[in-house]
Amino acid sequence: MRYQGRIYRPPSEADAYILQATIGCSWNKCTYCDMYRDKQFAVRPLADTLADVAAAGVEYGASVHKVFVADGDALVLDLAHWRAILAACRTAFPSLRRVSCYAMASNVLAKSADELRELRQLGLDLLYIGPESGDDVTLKKIAKGSTAADHVAAAQAAHTAGMKLSVIFLLGAGGIERSEAHARASAELATAMDPRFLSALTLTVVPGTPIARAEAKGLFTLPDIPTTLRELRTFVAHAAPTDAIFRTNHASNRLVLGGRLPRDRATILQAIDGALDGSVPLRPEWQRGL
Ligand code: SF4
């Protein structure tokens, strides 16, 4: 398979075939993100993408159950690309159960209800959306490009089309100043977006990013470990989706949790309280990743 640059995928797509259909992220402005800074956004030539699907079909065929379409916000692709890619995947991978991709709220809102429904019918059934925060002050500071209300509208459009959502929040994104507001508003947004899958990651300030420059100027302060755990606690205590699988299994997190929200809220809060009082060990810093 041919890949350009570093490739990222959610932890739950570790067993998926990753198909690179775009290069980089069409937005590429979030202040904390360095994933695609080395890439100029481009749509890969469709013939190249389809050739990769065909080659993967020959090599892996029926062993592929999941396809993750990369890079950063592959939902930005137009319908002509998606139709061809999804048809090729169905042909190449006869056991295919799910196709997913990263999406920004703006990618979802740029598509009509009919287009989203067609994508779902053709096999695109899971969107990973990372609002990171439900706090509009934080969203503006991190240059997410969309508000909490935009994310709610995007989630409603995806639900109407029959797509599942995996929604990601970023502990620490509001800095020390917005810590509590960020956690509470993120819980509210998680409730309103009502995803099937919900996760929290922890912000790492990566050298060279705008947020690192803000930190160097004293304009941003990353919350310390107890404050980050309290953010997580507030988030878990207040998030009330219908029935979401909640995970903090990303490498960036110090405390790995799993369960369903709201069903397992009390157990998850107990684990967070254990981490706060030192009785539950945290992942050592050297084991953390981005
Ligand atoms: S939308 Fe995602 S990939 Fe693009 S800059 Fe923001 S965090 Fe990075």
Image (cartoon, grey):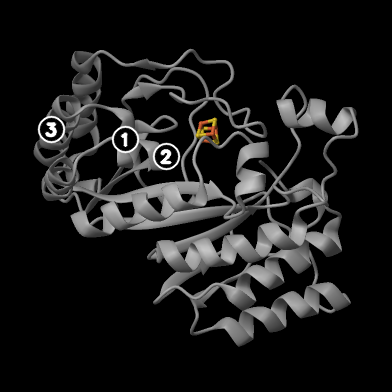
Tell me where residue 191 appears, x and y as whole percent: 47, 69
Q: Secondary structure at mark 3?
A: helix
* Residue at image location 62% in from the left, 87% down from the top: 266
Q: Which residue is mark 3?
A: 83
On screen, residue 43 above or below 34: above
Decide: marks 2, 3 in contact (CB < 8 A)?
Answer: no
Q: Secondary structure at mark 1?
A: helix
Q: Which residue is mark 2?
A: 104
Tell me where residue 54 appears, x and y as whole percent: 17, 26
In this rendering, does residue 37 appear at all? yes
User: For residue 75, which numbered disc appears in the image?
Assistant: 1
In this rendering, does residue 18 appear at all? no
Q: CA distance from mark 2 to mark 3?
A: 20 Å
Q: Nearer the viewer, residue 68 or 174?
A: 174
User: Which of the image's four quarters has the N terminus?
Assistant: top left
Label 2 beta carbon within 8 A of ligand 1: yes
Q: Nearer the viewer, mark 2 or mark 3?
A: 2
Q: Secondary structure at mark 2?
A: loop
Decide: marks 2, 1 in contact (CB < 8 A)?
Answer: yes
Q: CA distance from mark 3 to mark 1?
A: 12 Å
On screen, residue 95 above or below 240: above
Q: Which of the 4 image quarters holds residue 12?
A: bottom left
